[in-house]
Amino acid sequence: MRILALIERIIRQMLRDKRTLALLFFAPLVVLTLMYFFFNGNTADPELGTVDASAKLESALEKADIVVTAYEKADNETVIADNLDGLLTVEGRQLNLILQNSDPASARALQGKITQAALMQSAAPAGAVAENLEIKYVYGNENTEFFDVLSPILVGFFVFFFVFLISGIGLLKERISGTLERLLATPIRRGEIVAAYLAGFGLFAIIQTCIVVFYSINVLDMVMVGSVWHVIVINLLLALVALSLGTLLSSFAGSEFQMVQFIPIVVVPQIFFAGIIPLEGMADWLQNLGKVMPLYYAADALKSVMYKGQGLADIRGDLLALVIFAAVFIMLNVFALKRYRVL
């Protein structure tokens, strides 16, 4: 009987917590749906520029599901400017291939397709074709692994995740303990409270960000082509976004358990849009959905600096997006505090 009474109490407690029930049943469906669309999307055909390639070779490349664009003259800058996956230049029997190598797996797949296409249109043996194929890389080299591209994304994700969690639960404790309510009973403005909490938690976010960045680069020896200070700037902006988002969502949570429930809804989907899974072959609505995720811009900026060696001017669009996200979340924080100011 005592066990039955305890079971009944747990069931009633769960039934009274509508938010927990909704997230318990709804969150797995959201994540599973996203994974379904991600892993059932079509793979985008690689885009290859060609210079002085014969019509027969171009035809063989197109039959290998490669989108071919012919150029009279092109180089590395053309690959970057036109976002080509590669550039194939033909000089007699010599084939010069420049791979962008933003995704090492896709670059190797493209190299294999080009080798096959060259074999199809040539009577030369496979060894001779491979010998006449000289490969250069815009980013990285032949030893580049997938983790080299993935590591900048992971740095941003862990900064975002832990700052979001700590700031959200930190402000939640202020509410539960009554500190925030007593503070709101004073003449202090809501904007001043938000600014103070952001500055207070932000100090620890800055320290955490610097530790993560320097540890990743100097201890784990992650790939680092650009400036480490640019990486810190990006991560600090991302931490500000996570900080303001965490404090905002904590306003709608009644306990630490409910705060953690936001993770599968708010944090987990962002990792899918951070660049780990190529979005090019996905449906347009799915690609557009990624553009409302802060981590989408932060991951692109970090990858551009750490892997491609680009500067702040090249990623100004991503930085602007992060600033806008932070500004919007901070403003929403001010409005959210209004519900707790009873005097």
Image (spheres, helix red, strand yellow):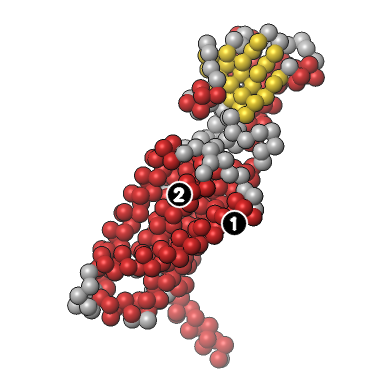
Question: What SS does tag 1 mark?
Answer: helix
Question: 336 left or right of 11?
Answer: left
Residue behind mark 1: 215
Residue behind mark 2: 234
Q: How many marks?
A: 2
Question: What SS does tag 2 mark?
Answer: helix
Dividing the image into 4 quarters, which one contains the N terminus? bottom right
Please state the horizontal and vertical placement of residue 4, each as a whole percent of the image.
54, 86
Question: 38 left or right of 169?
Answer: right
Please state the horizontal and vertical placement of residue 155, each as a whole percent of the image.
54, 53
Choose top left, top right, bottom left or bottom right for residue 239. bottom left
Choose top left, top right, bottom left or bottom right for residue 143. top right
Q: Is residue 103 visible?
A: yes
| Mark 1 Cα-neighbour bin, 10 Å: few <14, some 14–19, many ≥20 | few
Q: Is residue 191 above or below residue 139?
A: below
Q: Amino acid at mark 2?
A: Ile
Q: Amino acid at mark 1?
A: Tyr
**Lower sequence index among marks 2 and 1:** 1
Q: Is residue 171 above or below residue 135?
A: below
Between the C-alphas of marks 2 and 1, the distance is: 16 Å
Residue drawn at the location 61% of the way across and 11% of the way down: 53
